[in-house]
Amino acid sequence: MTEDFRDELHELREQNDREIQALEAATPPRIEREGSDELDVVSVRIGPDGDVRDVRVAHNWRDRVEGEALGDAIRAALVRAQASVVDEFITNVEAADPDRLPPPRPMPMPQDSGEVFGLTGSVSPEEAERIMAEIFGGAEQALAALESSLDAASIHSASSRSRHGEVHVEIDSGGDVSRLDLDPRWLAGAHPANVGRLVGETLRDAQQQMMTGFGAVSDAARETQHRMRRLGDPYTLSRRFGLQR
């Protein structure tokens, strides 16, 4: 590990942390959001994670939209609720001063080889080389596993139907509702409150399927984080094996 390489890696880590802090500061607060369609026929409330909490359909919706258009109105309200987070994030990023990034945070890392690898005493150059190869190899494997799980998640979708088929929802790999169909025969006599309740339940079921599909991504991300922490700071890593004083 040459000194130039250590310097470059150290600067990269610090710059990355500063940019992450800036993004964290620009991220909107995790609160409930609400959105309505253009005609205020439907209102959708979502939780901090984008999960559907409530769907409300106006009592006089039949006087304002055709039955076949109600599904589109629900989708539009949901999109607006979700878009409010994105809009706020973009506004915060645009308002941020790129020349005033926060200082890098100290990264808590183990200070000696014993803490990291369970070793005691001195380490021979051959053993140091083997251990370093193991660390870097493990990190590469973890990153590859994370990439694989992300690829799998990128094509994952979900579909849900209500018990008697009154509502059919499909969510694409990006988490967007690509389809929301309502049985017109049921819709003709259903109370607006029941329409909102059943649509909300079906949407939540589809969203839960999507979250289950992303479980592997979370596991892979945690393993990658663990492996990357073992790499530690490049200067500290060098000192652990007597390569730098």
Image: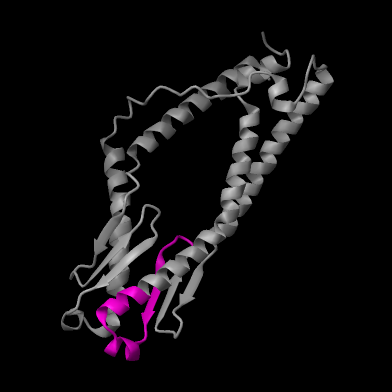
Residue at the bottom extreme of this rendering: 185
Residue drawn 62% across the image and 17% down it: 235
Residue drawn 51% across the image and 59% down it: 211
Q: Is residue 65 left or right of residue 128?
A: left
Q: Position of residue 238 (x, y in %)?
A: 67, 17
Magenta stretch: give its range. 173-198
Residue 75 to residue 184: above or below: above
Residue drawn 62% across the image and 21% down it: 234
Residue 169 visible to the viewer: yes
Residue 71 visible to the viewer: no
Q: Position of residue 118 (x, y in %)?
A: 75, 26
Residue 238 to residue 187: above or below: above
Q: Is residue 113 left or right of residue 123?
A: left
In the rendered image, residue 168 lying in the magenta stretch gets the answer no
In the rendered image, residue 193 lying in the magenta stretch gets the answer yes
Q: Position of residue 221 (x, y in %)?
A: 58, 45
- Residue 110: quarter of image: top right
Front-most of residues 197 and 101: 197
